[in-house]
């Protein structure tokens, strides 16, 4: 499986969830969508941090190192916001503000991964097709396993 397509698909799914949150005024629905965004981002960041980023780091270039380090820091900030969101009432004005900040953080992160001549995905292609396929298979298997555990819980 192509890990770039896999991660890009996850990006689009989260973007769609953000759009749904923006369109709804129902507190229960906002809470549910926030929960879905949180779960999706937690899975996505775990896959990147445990499988994808270490592989990019293997390129052993200054650009790869800088890109990976920045991505980890962006994830750290996202995790801080995700930790606070469940405590904010969906009817509170801070909920919308926090969701906007989270959305903007994600948009920036996605843009840096997907675009640019030195983007993360461009760097990943230097790993070669075979290595990428193996990474994608590992990521898909891990995602399936984690989602299965979550459904069973």
Image: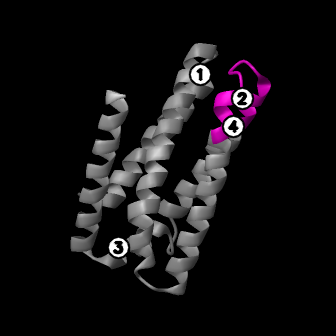
Please give the label number shown on residue 84: 4
Q: Position of residue 54 (x, y in %)?
A: 43, 71
Of badges 4 and 1, the one in the foreground is: 4
Lower sequence index among marks 4 and 1: 1
Q: Which residue is mark 3?
A: 125
State how far apart marks 2 and 3 are (Cα): 38 Å
Q: Which residues are magenta?
A: 83-99
- What's the magenta bit mostly, secondary-structure-wise? helix
Above-or-below relation of 31 to 101: above
Q: Position of residue 3 (x, y in %)?
A: 32, 59
Lower sequence index among marks 4 and 3: 4
Above-or-below relation of 122 to 1: below
* Residue lying at 48% horizontally and 37% vertically, measured from the top left: 39
Task: State the scheme by which the image is colored.
Answer: one colour
Q: Position of residue 76 (x, y in %)?
A: 62, 56
* Residue lying at 32% horizontally and 55% vertically, measured from the top left: 139
Q: Is residue 11 visible?
A: no
Q: Which residue is mark 1?
A: 30
Q: Secondary structure at mark 1?
A: helix
Q: Secondary structure at mark 2?
A: helix
State how far apart marks 4 and 1 are (Cα): 15 Å
Q: Which residue is mark 2?
A: 95
Q: Residue furthest front?
A: 153
Above-or-below relation of 100 to 69: above
Q: Are marks 4 and 1 in contact (CB under 8 Å)?
A: no
Of badges 2 and 3, the one in the foreground is: 2
State how far apart marks 4 and 3 are (Cα): 36 Å
Neighbourhood count class around disc 4 (C-alpha, 10 Å): few under 14, some 14–19, many 20 upward = few
Residue 28 position by quadrant: top right
Q: Are marks 2 and 1 in contact (CB under 8 Å)?
A: yes
Q: Secondary structure at mark 4?
A: helix
């Amino acid at each position: 499986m192509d890990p770039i397509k896999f991660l890009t698909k996850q990006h689009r799914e989260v973007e769609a969830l953000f759009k749904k949150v923006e369109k709804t005024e129902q507190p229960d629905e906002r809470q549910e969508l926030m929960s879905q965004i949180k779960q999706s981002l937690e899975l996505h960041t775990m896959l990147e941090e445990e499988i994808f980023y270490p592989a990019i780091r293997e390129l052993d270039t200054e650009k790869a190192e800088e890109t990976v380090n920045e991505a980890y820091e962006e994830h750290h900030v996202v995790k801080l916001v995700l930790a606070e969101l469940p405590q904010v009432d969906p009817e509170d004005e801070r909920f919308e503000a926090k969701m906007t900040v989270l959305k903007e953080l994600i948009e920036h992160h996605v843009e840096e991964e997907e675009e640019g001549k030195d983007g993360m995905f461009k760097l990943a292609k230097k790993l070669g097709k075979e290595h990428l396929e193996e990474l994608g298979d590992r990521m898909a298997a891990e995602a399936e396993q984690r989602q299965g555990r979550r459904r069973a819980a």
